[in-house]
Each structure stands twice: as structure tokens, then as C-alpha cells.
Image: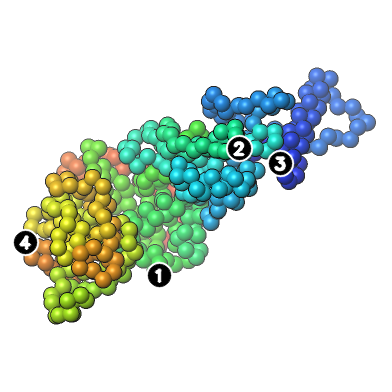
Amino acid sequence: MTRRFFTAPQTSGRGATLLRRTLIACAVGFFAAAAALGMVPADEPPAPVQHLVTRTLPLEPGDIQVGNAGSAPFISETRIRRGDTLAAVLQRLDAYDPKLLAFLTQDSGARSIYKLYPGRAVLAATDDQGNLVWLRYVHTPDARDDDQADNGTARMLVVKSNGEGGYTASERAEDTTTQASVAVGVIDSSLFAATDDAGIPDAITLQIADILGSKIDFLHGLRQGDRFRVVYQTRMHNGRYAGSGRVLAVEFINNGKRYDAVWFAPDGGTGAYYDFSGNSLRGAFLRTALKFTRISSTFGMRMHPLHKVWKEHTGVDYAAPTGTPIHATADGVVEYAGWQTGYGNVVILKNYGKYSTVYAHQSHIADGLHKGDKVEQGQVIGYVGATGWATGPHLHYELRVDNQPVDPLSVDLPVAHPMDPDERTAFMKAVAPYKAQITLLAQLPGQQVAGSDRVATR
């Protein structure tokens, strides 16, 4: 939805802006005169309704440019829609110009404009000739911030006219605030369709699928009438949506059974998701290091694709495009990060006790990752490639027990450690507000499901 701070009859072309301002000025003058007289002459027809919408905006030196007529910029705002193009966004802002579009496409400093996240706002200011004065887009919450903090920063792209028919682009950090948002939804066709109807950001939808993905088959197992309630973080910048944070709590009713999860970080340390009873939803190991992939070669004897001899394959190969992020399957310490013959770029992690993991044939290892670094489960440690002895881009993944490779697809993986009594007491206290919010959402009309059973989510 596009919002303009002044609304008036619409025309097209650059002269539209001047016409709108003229009409607005006449309307404002009319109502001011009527107020001074205390009445409108009875023998005149009622004046057409004109809407004046005001909003306080943070202004900086140079934001307001005074032209010959002494007019301020005309500021428009639109929210990004699913499937939007940059050209469509500029057109809704009355700021479309082939030269501007070419600049945004070609200038390296403006590349973030292509991160068109649905729901986020883009603002543009134009002068009385319809020329762009500035364009602003808060596109990325800073991932380095503490997700549990009340404050943080976000990255804003600022594009300005240089006064010579060209433009400049710059990035800057902007203060944001974090607030909790709640939503409920009902499955009619798919998870994404339901979360779109509920106004839930795509990033939150993906987190829900990731958190409960081992319990619910979100591709084939959803049923019409399934429902969910979720509490999640929202980042705001000057009253506008600037991105989402993490899911704080979620309850999902699938085929009459309840599954729930809540985020808990004891003592402000590394957090994880637990069910409402305090059981961890995260195993000590993930089954795969890639989110989207297919298995191209399994564990065991095979004909080596390069050497053409029968040889034991000590891991599992996952075919994926070059550059696909590789995630650590478990917490650990980097034992080796570099080049090894055959493996190419490889990372080896020392995990719990007798366990270690190998991630080979990477196009490149994650920046700043070195021997001795601590790594968390799910952290990106590199990117898929075809280095070493490889015929195409894939990840060769090994799970070792006492330095001996085992089949990661069939071995019984260790479970997460249970909470000790002190941790459980802290957990119950920390998650009580989220459980209360979920309970309140469940009491909304149409949210009760007769006969539902809560199931353990371990």
C-alpha cells in the first residue's frame, strides 16, 4: 500500500506534482477562511472533501530544498510487496526516471536497493518539478546486535540528487527499537499463504518452519484448518517497520496435535528453542549441513568418479549450487580450516567428546574462521564449491566417532543435554510471559480447536 502525506486528485507526468500541490493549497486556504468566518455560505454547494494527513519526519540539513516558489519537497512512502520490482516501487513513489533506475542498477553503493523485503518502507522526496531530492530505504537490521536488546541499529540506503543531473548513494547506521508482535493464522492452502494473510514477515515464516520442521512436514503434512499463534520480534525505525528479529514463541496445531516452542538464552548466553515443558528442540547434531539440497552420493563403497576405482566413500555428498551456505551441524571448535589434497577447501570441527565433523570441497571458507575458533550449531562456516577432487559443486560431509567415519544418515545421533534444576527454574520464569501471550491468543474467537492434544516435541 502506498501512503502519501498529502492526497489530492491524481494526474500523470511530472506536472502532476505541481497540480496536486496547487489543489492542496487551495483546499487548505478554503478551510482556513471557513474557520475564520465560522460558517460556509448556505447557498453554495458543499466543498469536496480534502484529506490532510500529517506525520512527523526526522529532517536533516539538505532535506528541504527551497525552490523559486518556496515549496518543500513532496514526500511519498510505499511498502514493498511480494514480487515487487524496483521499477514498480519507483513508479508508486512518483519517482520513476530511467536515469535514476540506471544509477540504482549500476552503482555499487546502491546495491542494497535490490534487497526488496516485503513489508518494509521506501520513502522518496521530489521537488515541485517532480525531480528526486532523496530516497531512503531501511533494508537490513544489523545482525551483530543482541537480539534480546531493546535497541539496535539498522542499515539505511540514502540516495540523493547531486544537483547536476546525477545521484549519489551512501549507507549509514540508524537507531532502531525492538518490540514484540503477535499474530494468529489458519492454514487454507499453504504456510506462506496463511502467514501472508496474517501479515507475518517471510523471515519469521522461515523460522517457524525451521524451528518445528523436525516435527511437522510443512510441505506435505499440513491440513486445511491447521492454525498457529506466534510471538516474534519486530525492529522499528522512526515508527516504521525496519525488519524482523527472531521468533520468541510459537504454537502450531497440526492435524489436531499441538506443537510449541519458545526461545530461551540462560544467563544471556547461547540460546536455543525448547518446548513449553523445557525439553530442547535441538539435537546435539543436525542431520544435514545444507538447508536446500539433494544427496548425490551416500556412505559406503562406490566407483570413484575421478579415479574410476572402487573405493569406500567415507561421507555423504550433497549436490548444491556453488555458493550455497554450509552450516555447522553441531557446536564445536575449529580443528582445521584450509586446503587439503582431495578435500580442497575443508573445515574440520571437534565436537562433543568423541565426535568430529568434516566439510569438504568448499568454494571458500567463511571469512575470519581460523583454527581454535568456537562455532555454534547452525553457524555458516563456508560455501559449497568444487575444489579438490570433485566433478561438480557439492558438499562432502563426514561424521567421525573416535576419528573413524560413520554413516551420518543412519547413526544414532546424541541428543542435547537436559537442563539442570537451576536452569529449569530460570527457564520457567523467563518463558512465563510468552506462554501467557500464546494462551491469550488461543482465547480469540475461532482459535479453539476441540479435542486437540498437546504432544511432546522432543
Could you tell me if the residues under marks 4 and 2 are in contact, i.e. CB atoms within 8 Å?
no
Instruction: Please state which amino acid type lies under the numbered disc 1.
Output: His
Q: Which residue is nearer to you in this view: 271 or 65? A: 65
Local SS, label 4? loop
Circle 3 residues within 10 Å: few <14, some 14–19, many ≥20: some
Contact check, label 3 and label 1, Cβ < 8 Å: no
Tell me the residue at 16%/73% (across/down).
Answer: 313
Cα separation between marks 2 and 1: 54 Å
**Quarter where residue 350 is shown:** bottom left
The amino acid type of the residue labelled 4 equals: Asp
Residue 338 vertical placement versus 126 (above, below): below
- The answer to whether residue 240 is visible is no
Q: Give the mark toward the camera: 3 or 1.
A: 3
Residue 263, above or below 211: above
Between residue 210 and residue 313, name the one nearer to us. Answer: 313
Does residue 109 appear to the left or right of 394 in the view shown? right
Between tags 4 and 3, which lies in front? Answer: 3
Gap in Å between the C-alphas at discs 4 and 1?
Answer: 38 Å
From the top left corner, tell me how far across and down residue 378 is, in percent: 26, 53
Q: Which residue is mark 2?
A: 165
Sequence-wise, which precedes: disc 4 or disc 2? 2
Tag 4 residue: 402
- Of callouts 3 and 1, which one flags the residue occurring earlier in the amino acid sequence? 3
Look at mark 3 in the image and give the residue it sits on: 14
| Circle nearer the N terminus (2, 3) | 3
The amino acid beneath tag 2 is: Gly
Which residue is disc 1 drawn over?
220
In the figure, residue 293 lies in which quadrant? bottom left
Alpha carbon of mark 4 to alpha carbon of mark 2: how far?
Answer: 67 Å
Judged by depth in the image, the label closer to the viewer, 4 or 2, is 2
